[in-house]
Image (cartoon, grey):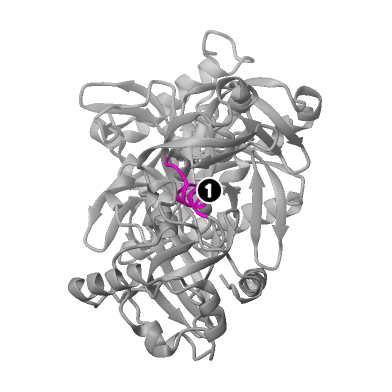
Amino acid sequence: MSSEDNRSSSIDTGTAENSPHEPSEPNPSLSESGEIGNLLDSVETLPAIAQGEIVPATVIKLTESEVVVDVGLKCEGVIPRSEFQSGDGQVEIAPGDVVHVLIEQYNEQEGTVTLSYQKAAKQKAWEDIERAFEEQRTITGRVLERIKGGLTVDIGVSAFLPGSHVDLRPHYNLESLLGREIPCKIIKLNRKRNNAVVSRKLALEEELTQRKARLLEQLREGAELTGRVKNLTNYGVFVDLGGMDGLLHITDLSWGRVGHPSEVVKAGQEIRVKVLKYDAEKGRVSLGLKQLAPDPWEGVPAAYHPGDRVTGRVVGVVDYGAFVELEPGVEGLIHVSEMSWSKRMKHPSKIVSVGDRVEAAVLDVNAGQRRISLSLKQTLPDPWKTLARRYTSGSVVEGRVRNLTEFGAFVEIEEGVDGLIHLSNLSWTKDVQHPSEVLKKGQKIQVVILGLDAAKRRVSLGLKQLQPDVWTDFCSRVEVGDTVRGKVSRLASFGAFVEIEAGVEGLCHITEVDEDHSGPSRLEVGSEYQFRILRLNPAEKKIGLSMKDVERPAASAKASPAAAGTEAASTAEAPEPPAAREETGPPSAAESEAPQPAAASGNEKRTAGSGSSTGARREVPQVEKENLASGVEHDQS
């Protein structure tokens, strides 16, 4: 049977089935000319199909190797099943689906047609690509593989994506894009060579510009926006607002203490933020997260008052104190001086640690400056309030030298109680210029309490009071007018300083050395002489001495014992009467320099500690009494 007969048969059958006006049975009276006419009309209604044309086709059935489709011709088309398979080998069509196919060959006489689904898809893709290229429209592609210099992207056809056009910034991990759907723009196209080059960078820039324009429309101080955490730093968080990045400083993350932004947010997290400041010229946006929540300091004046006892958690320890969190977002400071009653400042870490629960007393509240001053020692007993019950003046206590200063030494006699040993109370005999000459820091010593003043928190201590006062002892054994023996310790322009006993020193003024006021040059340092006491002042520890009218010449320290003994014997046999001394006047320089006898007078023996004089006391003439009265004018300390 010829193709025309098949076509005629198909047309007759179709006409009989589809015409509602014809009877179900053929009209035997139909003329031959009428049949020919109907046949010609049916032929004219067949679609005109040209080779290379893309037409819609309806899927009729699927077999293991083929897909049968109807393209509206008198015959059905067959397409290999493999053309419909996806990358994973699955066929995602079903009978009744409409697909577009390409007419590769059509033989009307033989009634055969060759179709291709992939070629139709490729041709249609090229047409879409050309239109997108002309319109500079963004299209979507799927990354297939990594190749030299970039990536291969399926945009309907295989296209090349250069590595420099992968992202807005250099992208070093191209493999992370494999299998992902990405937006891109066509930057180069050559259909004849089957060549297409795309750019993801241009598509992202266009998207960024559009998002930025939308953002600027609503960007203003006080506005609440949604962004995504882009980057974390030690000082804050960068948030992508969509076309522009904003900085969320670490201090604006929470009302409470934040050590690192990662404690509050994470990279990639979507958060709601508030615009705190926007600088259009510099393009900077400052954001806040804690500003979306109520400020806890608003209720502080009503909740905390000076004198209150509060409990909190130590959240920070620094050199100058410890920070205590009283409630989320509200912290107080315990200064290092409020850690303990002791004046010996310890580092706060020696008393409290981060995480400790502590009870403290509120000293001051300043909500405007967001400060609460706390005290730890105010919750402990004050040792100064009961000090008078534990110590009295004159008590001997033990303590540790805590600090040395220019004016004395501080000694801690118990925890929180320090006393001061003044320089003048360190030694009876030494002229102490600095306490380090007597004491060392950290040394344990015994001291005498000289005075207590709990109101002013002061304790006066003494070290020398542990020993008897040599001046008091000396002044109890001598009187004005007594003769004493002393050694010249040092010379000055106004006189000579004489050491009478250990720790007891007097001054012989230049006018009391001799009558001609020749000065102390006739005296030698280290030599011993006899002196007469002109003045005693135990309170000021001053003694005025004179070499005039001394009963016996002082023996030189350099004189031999034999000579001293001989002269002592002769002097004992023939003492010079006071009247003769008065008439003849003071001794000559030679007499003054002569060796003095070893035997001391009765007054010297008293000085030596006998307690009473063995010889008769010399009567003091009237002129000598006048000299004694004027001795105060010559004495200089």
- Count residues near mark 1 (Cα–Cα under 10 Å), then give few for <14, some for 14-19, many for 20+: some
Residue 124 visible in image: yes
Q: In the image, what residue occupies the spot 32% across and 43% down? A: 118
Q: Position of residue 125 (x, y in %)?
A: 42, 50
Q: Is residue 237 above or below residue 271?
A: below
Q: Nearer the viewer, residue 89 or 476?
A: 476
Q: Looking at the picture, does residue 372 appear above or below residue 191? A: above
Placement of the C terminus among the 4 image quadrants: bottom right
In this rendering, the answer to whether 303 lies above or below 400 is above
User: What are the residue bounds of the magenta stretch?
Assistant: 467-478
Is residue 213 shown left or right of residue 66? right
Total numbered labels placed on residues in the image? 1
Q: Which residue is mark 1?
A: 236
Q: Position of residue 459 (x, y in %)?
A: 58, 37
Q: Residue at x 58, y 25 (%)?
A: 383
Q: Is residue 319 above or below residue 334?
A: below
The answer to which image quadrant residue 324 occupies is: top right
Label 1 sits on what residue type? Answer: Gly
Q: Evaluate whether residue 104 shows in this view.
A: no
